[in-house]
Image: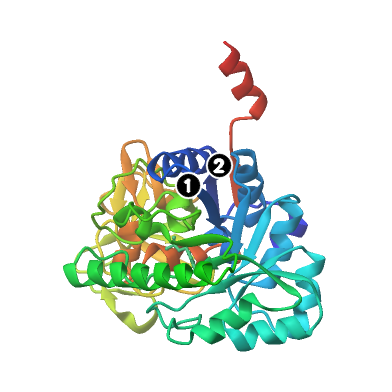
Amino acid sequence: MAHKKTGIFKRAWIEIDLDALAHNVHDIKSKIQSGCDIMAVIKADAYGHGVGRVAERLVREGISTFAVATLSEGAEVREYAPESDILVLGYTHPADAKHLVKYRLAQLASDAVHARALDETGHKISIHVAIDTGMHRLGVEPMHFSDIESIYKSRNLTVVGTATHLASPDSLAESDIEFTELQMERFITVVQRLRDKGYDVGKLHTQSSYAIYNHPDIDCDYVRPGIMLYGVHSQDDDTKVSTDLRPVLSLKALIAQVRQIDKGESVSYGRIYTAKTPIMLATVSIGYADGIPRNLTGHDGMCIVNGRKVPIIGRVCMDMLMLDVTGAGEVKAGDIATFIGKVGDIEIRCEELADCAGTITNEILCRLGARLPRIYTEKSTEEEFVRQRL
Ligand SMILES: *Cc1c(COP(=O)(O)O)cnc(C)c1O
């Protein structure tokens, strides 16, 4: 990426508050069962936060287990977390098995076919077994018990964990709560059956963020929080357990041009916006190539400029978008436009942006960053140490 070669130029950027990340880790720890550890989910470049600095800080906060989606993500995390356990949740082709060994990654075995193929490579690999209790994405269904059993008997694979993934832990509707309970019952039954037959199932884990919020009684060895580490919900919703999370990421860009346009003039591609009165128009140096959803237009207050919330008008372009800054006082080129984050008392939360774009924060966050430099802030550990001693 260009900014890696040339340094950070001011155009559009992400600010990452690593102290907020640390705060979130400790908040999650205080909410989960004692004896349960955090397996920090840092796939998709740590949900757009930049996996290197995130992993490094999480290690310093005592996290020793990570989950990623792909083999190459695992290899990257290994650089920053040399001693940690790292689990690859997504499919790894058996032809790549040697890289699991090289980077000391554990692999989630999708099913007996996957496990057998990995086993036949002859590589000594640590695996977790995926039980499909109703998500129907990856895993083996409990009714195929002999397939499940065959994985634990592999010659070259060592099973170090057994897991399932819940389909609707975010919902507080009765039928969804019942479905989660059914999934857990299926999981526990399989685990018990395996144990009765003398297999070591390793560490158990089932809960992503919303299962931590809404099913806090589940008692496994690990929880697998992703989105909650980054201090946001997936959407604006209520959860059973209340948390004190702090958003880690802010998104900002520079205003490139400001001028008045006349009543009746249209703005941007497709002319979906026409000024009903003369307006002050500001063009901002950020667009959908930076991760701003193309449909994020026509809502009030999608950006903070000069201490006021202003709307995005017209279609979002690849590299730019336009704001109506009529109500925002004196605005000039070079001023900062904030799309996610807090300016004084005014805040736009990622949940609001996601809602206007018709998606969830997970998608917004992991799509940011391809072209945006990240600026990290954290108190130096030295400073913290001194403060603790005082
Ligand atoms: C992505 C993922 C998670 C984390 O999900 P969040 O909703 O972001 O907490 C946990 N487990 C699995 C298997 C995942 O794929």
Q: Quadrant of residue 118?
A: bottom right
Residue at figure coordinates x 45%, y 79% from the top left: 132
Give whichever of discs 2 and 1 has the lower sequence position.
2
Mark-to-mark CA distance, 2 and 1: 7 Å
**Element on which disc 2 rests:** helix
Left or right of 206 in this view: 241:
left
Numbered badge on residue 54: none
Res 280 seen here: no
Residue at figure coordinates x 67%, y 53% from the top left: 52
Where 33 sits versus 237, above or below?
Answer: above
Viewer-side residue, 112 vs 260: 112
**Element on which disc 1 rests:** loop
Where 154 sits versus 34, above or below?
Answer: below
Q: How is the image coloured?
A: rainbow
Viewer-side residue, 335 vs 83: 83
Q: Amino acid at mark 2?
A: Leu
Disc 2 vs disc 1: Cβ atoms closer than 8 Å? yes
Res 264 seen here: yes
Q: Quadrant of residue 149?
A: bottom right
User: Mark 2 highlights which residue?
Assistant: 18
Residue 111 x/y as whole percent:
57, 83
Quadrant in the picture for the C terminus: top right
Disc 2 crowd, CA 10 A, few/some/many (<14, 14-19, 20+): many
Residue at figure coordinates x 32%, y 65% from the top left: 169
Check mark 1 vs ligand 1: CB closer than 8 Å? yes or no: no
User: Mark 1 highlights which residue?
Assistant: 248
Q: Amino acid at mark 1?
A: Val
Residue 148 x/y as whole percent:
54, 81
